[in-house]
Image (cartoon, grey):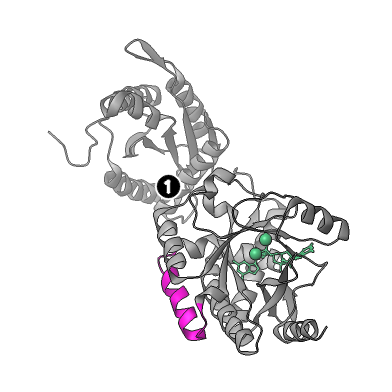
Amino acid sequence: MQTHGIDPGTGFLDRSSCLELVSKLAFSAAASGQQLAALWIDLSRLKQVNESFGHLGGDLVITQIAQRLREKSAGRGEWCRMGGDEFVCLMPQCDADRARQLAQELLQAIEAPLRFGELFLHPSASIGIAVLEANEDPFAFLERADRAMGTAKRQGGGRAVASGEEPMPGRLGILLAREELAIENKLHLALENGGLSLHYQPIIGFDGSVEAVEALMRCTADNELIPPGKFIPVAEKTGLIIRLGEWSLLAGARFASHLDQAGYRTKVAINVSRAQLASPKFAQALHAALLCANVSPELIELELTESLFMDISEIVQTNLHAAQKAGVGLAIDDFGTGYSCLANLKDIPATKLKLDRAFGRELGMTVVAEGVEEQAQLDSLREAGVDAIQGYIHAHPMPEEALLNWFQKRKAS
Ligand code: C2E
Ligand code: MG
Ligand code: MG
């Protein structure tokens, strides 16, 4: 029979009783001026036991370890089971040194081999230690123990870490975090105040045609230009990339329509990030952009980074096919820098491959070499059978007006 408040597998208090108890103990510790410590214990590899021996096997391990914990702590604390393989020991009248001492003893007890039929298991654990601070919220106190346990785990497990002893993010880490915050702020500013723009860089075929122009986002805030290498990673981290991406889809599609009306019918290639393509709103955003810009879809090409194809989720698959059905082109960007292999490419409805600066190879798609700066590179790429070139050797990315002038000059000569 299940007793309320008690975990049947271990006889420990269950999670909700633990939360009740910690509040009570924290209150009396504060009233009496005594210390209260908590150990948060996480067993390693229990998932493996469950997978190899089933949940009955896992339960058996838990029961035996719980027995060891109870014996070793011998009345020094109250035991609670917080869930699957996580335990908490609440210890009244216990300071940091004694908590650390008990943690070491518990680790030793846990690590003794455990017989399992013919096999011996070698259990291990990670332990986080916290001591209640003056006026501290009891749940925040427990959370600190949990976080310290996480640190112990990341350090490889089999150890105890006290809250407050976790390695601080280094000075460099703090500076980076601040810079990211500043960039995030500037991205918001730019989104609201028209600080975003697209520059366009021509991609030119060896037959002399303009294969496409690539739309590259530029961001200005507080009169400062932030390079994409800086703001794109921050946008991806914060999720802002979805809004930026929708903005560039629409702006790029509008410009494609504008170019077409000006008599320069050229594809505009727009970069799409992984997060956008994994969003259920992607297909809708694409259709909206095509419709608003009143542009024919074959004038739009989406550049998808190679890393996307490492692990194609169902939603990405659906979005890729929606894009294909909408009639836009798909190009694989930065090929050669990531993980995809040529074999994977057969499964992707792409029509173009954009090689990263370092690579060259032919396939059944249009092959574009990126970042070509010198004549010697151009010559060997021509030799290798690459179809088109994007790079400073032909043109740098430029604002809309400049690109229109570039087209005009080209036509004239
Ligand atoms: P990408 O899509 O691979 O774009 C090509 C990058 O190579 C551009 O950098 C371009 O200016 C640069 N490049 C072109 N020719 C040369 C060359 O001859 N030499 C050298 N050294 N570089 C060359 P940019 O404009 O700084 O953009 C960097 C990356 O930021 C892009 O790489 C793309 O991944 C990302 N990005 C830019 N705009 C967007 C956007 O609207 N959405 C998303 N998701 N990503 C974007
Ligand atoms: Mg690109
Ligand atoms: Mg690229």
Q: Which residues are magenta?
A: 279-296
Q: Is residue 35 above or below residue 272?
A: above
Q: Quadrant of the C terminus?
A: bottom right
- What residue is drawn where x is 35% and y is 10%? 118
State the residue in front, 145 or 325.
Answer: 325
Secondary structure under badge 1? helix
- What residue is drawn where x is 28% and y is 34%? 12
Quarter of the image for residue 69 reads top left
Q: Is residue 378 left or right of residue 264?
A: right
Q: Is residue 358 left or right of residue 169?
A: right
State the residue in front, 73 or 347.
Answer: 347
The amino acid type of the residue labelled 1 equals Leu
Asked if residue 118 lies in the magenta stretch, the reply is: no
How would you classify the magenta stretch by its main secondary structure?
A: helix
User: Residue 271 at what x, y percent from top left?
Assistant: 60, 67
- What residue is drawn where x is 37% and y is 51%? 27
User: Residue 256 at what x, y percent from top left?
Assistant: 60, 81
Give the quadrant of ligand 2. bottom right
Asked if residue 288 lies in the magenta stretch, the reply is: yes
Q: Residue furthest bottom?
A: 262
Q: Residue furthest front?
A: 207
- What residue is drawn where x is 46% and y is 83%? 291
State the residue in front, 172 or 411.
Answer: 411
- How many numbered marks does the figure carry? 1
Q: Which residue is mark 1?
A: 142
